[in-house]
Image (spheres, rainbow, N blue to C red):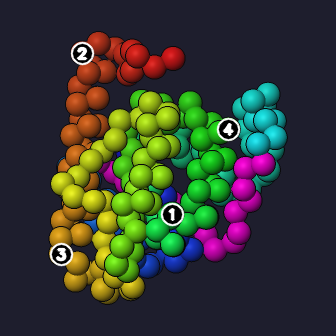
Amino acid sequence: MRVLMVNGSAKASGCTARALREVGETLQKEGIEYEIYQLGGDPIKDCTGCGACRKTGKCIFKDPDLTEFLEKAEKADGFVFGTPVYYAHPSGRILSFLDRVFYSAGSLFKGKPGAAVCSCRRAGEVCSMDVLNKYFTINAMPIASSTYWNGVHGSTAEQVEMDTEGLQTMRNIGHSMANLLKNENRAVMETGNRTDFIR
């Protein structure tokens, strides 16, 4: 089993990456592989709603990030989307990316569990988490929950390191994701069907 994570920050070693890594290390202890997919520092084109992907099954804008990610997503069993908080909202980078990914290839995600992870200095993670969770709920994805708001606090990765409650919350997300994946895998072995209710 494999979980694909998305770092929606332009910083590959910042606060969001530190939070995702904590989730990932917990997954590893549960026997589940993970990969953090870094979106990079270049601007990401927004979805224009042109509808071309309805005919071709692919976004017509040939961003390397999008193509590479969808190849990985097809083989992934679960997802974690991480974002820094900007003005009590996810980064425009991850929203543009997810709009295009879900609009053009939503079927790759149906029935697979997802979790949202946010990093902020003080507040705003609740609003950001709500926005990201909607991608899951609109696309028939079970949500891997935790025991508190899915956020870490700090302006630097070093400050996040001191947020013991936030890091524990990340570990709890990892355990929750592992439980969902293992239960789903057990159901597949027993019934032969991954998600009977999904069309």
In the image, residue 149 sits, relative to residue 192, either above or below, namely: below
Tell me where residue 26 appears, x and y as whole percent.
23, 58
- The numbered disc on residue 104 is 4
| Element assignment for label 4 | helix
- Dividing the picture into quadrants, the one containing residue 82 is bottom left
Apparent side of residue 168 relative to residue 157 in the rendered image (left or right): left
Comes first in the chain, label 4 or label 2: 4
The mark closer to the camera, 1 or 4, is 1
Q: Residue at x 61, y 64 (%)?
A: 93
In front: 184, or 118?
118
Q: Mark 4 and mark 2 in contact? Answer it, CB < 8 Å.
A: no
Q: Which residue is mark 2?
A: 190
Label 3: state its secondary structure.
helix
**What secondary structure is found at the residue carrying circle 1?**
loop
Residue type, label 4: Ser
The residue positioned 30% from the left and 60% from the top of the image is 150
Q: CA distance from mark 3 to mark 1?
A: 23 Å
Residue at (39% x, 15% y) in the render: 196
